[in-house]
Image: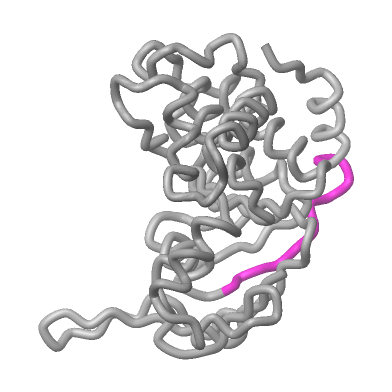
Amino acid sequence: MMQLSHIFKDYSNDGVVTKVLHDVSFIIESGEFVSIMGPSGSGKSTLMHIIGFLDRPTSGDYFFQDANVAQFSDDALANLRNERIGFVFQAFHLLPNTTVFENVLLPLMYSSRDESERGNLVNAAIESVGLSHRRDHLSHQLSGGEKQRVAIARALVNEPDFILADEPTGNLDSKSGASIMAILQKLNHEGKTILVVTHENLTAQHAKRIIRIRDGMVEADELVNNHIRAMEKSSESSFQLK
């Protein structure tokens, strides 16, 4: 699905150059569940912005579904972001004083789909995260875990191939965080490619593969070991949406 080859990223401010990413290379195949893990300042957020078409590398090649991203205009990248990638952020970014339905509808506002199809897509996305009973509640009436479920439903509504989650459990207690990761595991089992960016070891271990970033470089790229995968399967079997 995506290939990063010798990615470098520098920022220049008043003649001072800050080097953030240094020769980063890896491939993420369709259907994988990957965590990018690293401490604050490691470059993982910058890497996420590049992967999600929010920023461009200083040098190197990024191929998304066999197309070189460097060849796309900013408008084309904006369309890719909206149609092919679903974003989930730590801060939820829900619209205040609007319902769950209205928040999930937002990515479809400029879609060519008719009103009936939009409604069906929104209801299906809300149902997939177990919030049909909260469909008409306002965002401020929801718990933190429910808000993140709404954010996941909003990421799903355009039926993207790829879910990019930035610290999805960062603002949640451990129980709510585990529920969110179980939803992401379920989506992966249904065929979605999932990429989670996190500094939390427990969150990262829900993935099948962990890419560790330190000082702007790939420190390790490893499969999650068997006993952690067994824990994951156990948590999946016991998890029920409420």
Q: Quadrant of residue 139?
A: top left
Q: In this view, does 158 lie to the left or right of 205?
A: left
Residue 30 coordinates in the image, percent (x, y): 77, 62
Residue numbers of the magenta segment? 218-228
Q: In this view, does 102 lie above or below 217?
A: above
Q: Which residue is drawn at 82% across and 42% down?
A: 190
Report the number of numbered marks: 0
Q: In which quarter of the image is residue 74?
A: bottom left
The quadrant of the picture occupied by the C terminus is: top right
The quadrant of the picture occupied by the N terminus is: bottom right
Residue 10 coordinates in the image, percent (x, y): 34, 82
User: Nearest the camera: 104 or 21?
Assistant: 104
User: Nearest the camera: 205 or 6?
Assistant: 6
Q: Which residue is drawn at 39% across and 11% down?
A: 141
Q: In this view, does 140 lie to the left or right of 89?
A: left
Please indicate, yes or no, whether residue 82 appears anywhere in the rendered image.
yes
Please indicate, yes or no, whether residue 198 appears anywhere in the rendered image.
no
Q: Is residue 173 left or right of residue 223?
A: left
Q: Does the magenta stretch include residue 220?
A: yes
What's the image's color scheme? Answer: one colour
Residue 35 coordinates in the image, percent (x, y): 64, 54
Residue 124 coordinates in the image, percent (x, y): 67, 29
Q: Is residue 146 left or right of residue 45?
A: right
Q: Is residue 141 magenta?
A: no
Q: Which residue is drawn at 69% across and 55% down?
A: 161
Q: Quadrant of residue 238?
A: top right
Q: Which residue is drawn at 50% across and 56% down?
A: 82
